[in-house]
Amino acid sequence: MGLEVLQAGPGAEVTPAPEPADAGSEPADAVSEPPDAVFYYDLASPDCYLVAERIRAELPVVCDWEPVHAVSLGLPDGGEGLDRETFAEAVAALELLPLRLPEAWPPDSALAMRTATYAKGAGKSIAFSLAAFRQAFAGGRDLSEEATVLLAAAACEIHPAAALKGAGLRSTAAALDAAGARAQAAGVTALPAFALPNGVTVCGPRALDEAIAATQRRSPTQAGNLSDAAGQQRSQPTRREGFSG
């Protein structure tokens, strides 16, 4: 298909892929333990992108990735007023591919979020979402365009026809709405957000740091067990503030 798949990390390159790329380097959604946290995110959010690249290395608990459409929930996605210079520095600190945003910014993420929801049903929301984030923030591709969604789908071996059909299903839209309702019920007021045990929800640019601190306050035995259970969720770490004015 001649699709272009982006991979993150030091020395990463953009290479043509005649067939959908093997997503084996990214973890499947399924884990042997029930999730101890839920990560709410929108693919158009710069802060969500950076958290997604940190979360698997830094959050020592099993975490479920829950796509939600910020605009539909009346939440800012973080794209308006983006401080591009500061954000580019944060991207470089993570040793990701250099920042490259699409000409149309911020993007409409509705199609991408429906596709992420469909991918979640197939157990591939993490792989799809990381690929979509990288297409948007490192590939300069517009998330509102079908071509961008299909590139991300190819990275996790979802057939293009299945991705588009799945994104258009009423059941997919209903699932995305239900995720939004769960986010609102959990008290999500900004993205990224983490819903933690005991009804604690942390929101905004420092949500990951606050979630990490909350999990570290557990007993050493609990923390050790959770770290083992979450061992498959890995990435590169860093710390930062938000990037929108």
Image: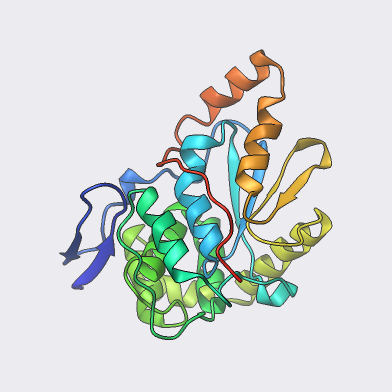
Q: Examine the rendering and report whether any part of residue 121 can be seen.
A: yes
What's the residue at 50%, 70% (across, down)?
83
Does 1 appear above or below 199? below
Question: Looking at this rendering, what residue extends furthest in the bottom direction?
Answer: 104
- Residue name at image x 65 percent, y 15 percent: 220
Q: Classify 190 as above or below 173.
A: above
Q: Position of residue 98 (x, y in %)?
A: 31, 62
Q: Is residue 78 left or right of residue 29?
A: right
Which colour assignment does the render follow? rainbow
Residue 32 figure quarter = top right
Task: Say which of 46 and 27 sits in front.
Answer: 46
Residue 5 spot, x, y in % from top left: 27, 63
Quarter of the image for the N terminus: give it. bottom left
Q: Position of residue 209 (x, y in %)?
A: 62, 41
Residue visible at 63% across and 57% down in the picture? 192
Write the residue at 23% across / 52% down. Answer: 12
Note whether residue 123 is visible: no
Pick whichever, 215 or 39, lies toward us.
215
Where residue 8 sits: x, y (%)?
Answer: 32, 53
